[in-house]
């Protein structure tokens, strides 16, 4: 079945490390939901069109749907290599929108930042200065920070191109990071356990757990300064 084929692909990702499991699961989940109990060799063009319509009705952009279709194509390729399927259907990708051109001018960035909680102000400052991806910033651990040398480090294998990076912090960022480290250490002593991540929930029912995303806080901050539709990924262009 398609779901068995997708499960093999997930195992392949886990073994080879070609894609993080968290990222892979976002692509695999909708595919498994739609193709449940469907035989892999019975998938034809009209079935794939049905999947596209199913995802478009959920409001997904063509680019997102294309990423999911590409994962499905990879699963079929792996199935052929392992002798589990007889054929691979022709998968036509959709036309995607032009790449975004938006970026933050400094006054806009500062306006949004002041409406975010203190810990998230640190996160977006790193994104703004260096163009690091949200996943790279939010997964930072205390061991990747050297306050004495004034550096932040991404380990090899944790970035999209698999290469490590080291950047020197500006004086302002060093102050912000130092304050965040103190907040983490204070909560660590309070909870009586080691908290290795730089960005954790400081209060509420998830207190002490890593912060992976902050979509709601970001959207609210943008709304308050009239920058509706701006994305955190726009920091990539802003840094350039």
Image (tube, rainbow, N blue to C red):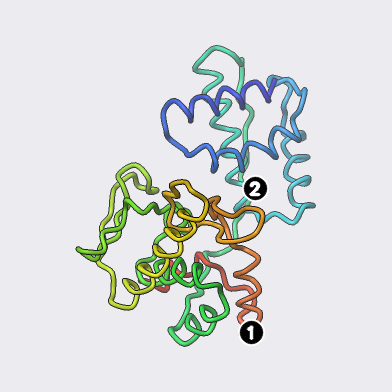
Picture layout, residue 215 above or below residue 195: below
Residue at (40% x, 54% y) in the render: 140
Residue toward you, 174 or 48: 174
Residue at mark 1: 226
The percent coordinates of residue 166 (x first, y second) are: 25, 57
Using the rendered view, name the quadrant where residue 240 is placed: bottom left
Residue 127: image x %, image y %?
A: 42, 66
Binning the other alpha carbons within 10 Å of mark 1 as few (below 14), some (14 to 19) or many (20 upward) gives few
Residue furthest out toward the bottom: 107
Question: Which residue, given by chain and number where applicable, does mark 2 sit on?
Answer: 65
Q: Quadrant of the N terminus?
A: top right
Looking at the image, residue 230 sits to the left or right of residue 155; the answer is right
Q: Secondary structure at mark 2?
A: helix
Q: Looking at the image, which is closer to me, 12 or 211?
A: 211
Drawn side of residue 161 relative to residue 187, left or right: left
How many numbered callouts? 2
Alpha-carbon distance for marks 1 and 2? 29 Å
Residue at 66%, 79% in the rendered image: 223
| Left or right: residue 223 compared with residue 154 | right
Q: Secondary structure at mark 1?
A: loop
Q: Sequence order check: which comes first, mark 1 or mark 2?
A: 2
* Nearest the eye: 208 or 29: 208
Say which quarter of the image contains residue 83. Answer: top right
Q: Position of residue 188 (x, y in %)?
A: 46, 53
> Residue 48 versus residue 125: which sits nearer the camera?
125
């Amino acid at each position: 079945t398609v779901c068995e084929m997708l499960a093999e692909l997930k195992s392949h990702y886990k073994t080879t490390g070609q894609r993080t499991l968290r990222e892979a699961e976002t692509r695999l989940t909708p595919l498994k939901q739609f193709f449940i109990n469907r035989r892999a060799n019975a998938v034809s063009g009209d079935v794939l069109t049905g999947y596209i319509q199913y995802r478009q009705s959920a409001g997904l952009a063509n680019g997102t749907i294309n990423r999911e279709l590409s994962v499905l194509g990879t699963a079929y390729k792996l199935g052929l290599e392992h002798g589990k399927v007889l054929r691979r259907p022709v998968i036509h990708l959709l036309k995607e929108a032009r790449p975004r051109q938006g970026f933050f001018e400094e006054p806009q960035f500062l306006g949004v930042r002041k409406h975010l909680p203190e810990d998230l102000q640190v996160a977006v400052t790193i994104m703004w200065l260096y163009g690091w991806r949200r996943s790279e910033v939010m997964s930072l651990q205390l061991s990747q920070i050297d306050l004495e040398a004034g550096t932040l480090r991404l380990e090899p294998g944790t970035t999209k191109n698999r290469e490590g990076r080291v950047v020197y912090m500006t004086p302002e960022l060093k102050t912000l990071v130092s304050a965040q480290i103190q907040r983490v250490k204070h909560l660590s002593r309070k909870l009586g356990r080691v908290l290795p991540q730089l960005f954790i929930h400081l209060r509420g029912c998830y207190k002490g757990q890593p912060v992976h995303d902050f979509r709601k806080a970001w959207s609210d901050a943008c709304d308050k300064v009239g920058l509706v539709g701006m994305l955190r990924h726009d920091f990539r262009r802003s840094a350039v």
